[in-house]
Image: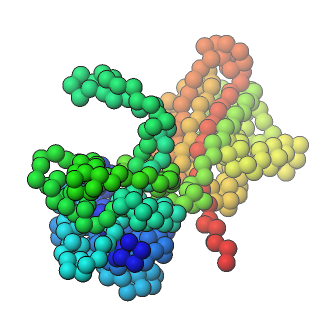
Amino acid sequence: MTNNPLYLILTAAGSSSRLGLRTKKEYLPVQDGTVLSEGAKTFLTTAHFDAVIITVPKDGKEQAQNAFFSNPNMESFLKGTPVFFIEGGSSRQASVFAALTYLHNMNTGRGASPAVLIHDAARPFVTSQIISDIIEATKQYGAAVPAIPAVDTQKEKSSENGIITRHLDRKNIVAVQTPQGFSLEPLFLCHQTAARFSHEYTDDTEIWDAFPDITGNKKVHIVDGDIKNKKITYKEDLAMLTPQEERPQIRIGFGTDLHRLVPGRKFMLGGVDIPAMKGELAHSDGDVLLHAIADALLGASGLGDIGSYFPPEDAKWKDADSAFLLRTIWTDVKKEGWELENMDCVVETEAPKLLPWRQAIIKSIASILEVESTRVFVKAKTNEKQDAVGQGNAIKTYCTCLLSRRQPRVPAQA
């Protein structure tokens, strides 16, 4: 087959229903184009193909073309290789048969023995190594497939009652991927024969092995696959489309504070002045909740703690407005690119009762941080008359927060 034609089939006729998205998975953006164009780019920059066939849904040719040519360099990758968008069938098997029929008719009378590579367009991260290995193995053996060793222990179960019927030897089990490579004409005849039966075959290697009288009993040769060559199937797989360096960085912060309660001081909580018999004794205004929030934010962002920002021994911060302190800290945290996902606060106090004030406190904190109130929650607990808090002589608060930021994409080195 050294000088014989080589064709590429990209299957993209499915509905992507398991993802529950409006956009087909093959048309989702990734890198400089889409899932469809990203996989095609690797094939076209690895080997020369005499034609590319892309199976698409009914009436979906224009959308597929837009997705394929979304990469601005696609024409240069093609180098004149013709691309044909054809309507697929109701199953992957039917779609591949339609593409093989198209190539069979194209090749009729040419006297050549072409090879064809069949690839799931929803596998955008196929490697050049896999493609090269499949091409060489197909030339040598007539049929080839990439595969990776099974990680989990494999069992065979009964379709009737769900019990294990056979324990399989994992060292002899592999998970196959695409592209799968074949001699075109024998595979076309196998598909043509398979179409006469109601049995639905799982992939093209099964169809190839089902008709040894057509293939000359040539077996499918296995080459090394790659765990990165994963098919996008479920919502969880969509994370693959975002490069690691562009994925959100997530940090959790925890803050706590405690102040004595004494007569003659304001009871400040979350920026709200609440009528009470006692208030917090502190160097600043004593807003114990805002202090815990500040420490949680500083801890998550790695910028320090409230004591290092506003030393209590510094007279400058005597009776300071804790809301101002928190705004100052939050400004620095935001400068580092962090955004607040949510925070959850607990207030331990015997009195006053905070439920009537909770929404005002939440609204105040959200206003200070300039976020939606839904990102902040505050709940109160008593200490059942135990310790200083339970005896009404102290108040203690806790805050956990979740921050996120997107890392800037690192440009490739020239």
* In the image, residue 165 above or below residue 66: above
| Residue located farthest toward the bottom when viewing the structure as drawn | 80
* In the image, residue 140 above or below residue 236: below
**Residue 89's spot in the image, x, y percent?**
17, 60
Q: Is residue 27 visible?
A: no
Residue 311 falls left or right of residue 343 = right
The residue depicted at 22 percent of the width and 63 percent of the height is: 188
**Residue 331's spot in the image, x, y percent?**
67, 58
Task: Report the front residue among 359 and 26.
Answer: 26
**Residue 124's spot in the image, x, y percent?**
43, 62
Q: Quadrant of residue 413?
A: bottom right
Q: Is residue 353 visible?
A: yes
The residue depicted at 61 percent of the width and 30 percent of the height is: 347
The residue depicted at 36 percent of the width and 76 percent of the height is: 4
The residue depicted at 59 percent of the width and 31 percent of the height is: 346
* In the image, residue 106 above or below residue 214: below
Q: Quadrant of residue 167?
A: top left
Q: Quadrant of the N terminus?
A: bottom left
Residue 399 falls left or right of residue 89 = right
Residue 389 falls left or right of residue 226 = right
**Residue 289's spot in the image, x, y percent?**
65, 37
Task: Report the front residue among 336 and 239.
Answer: 239
| Residue located farthest toward the top when viewing the structure as drawn | 385
Task: Report the front residue among 183 and 44.
Answer: 183
Task: Report the front residue among 405 and 382.
Answer: 405
Q: Quadrant of the C terminus?
A: bottom right
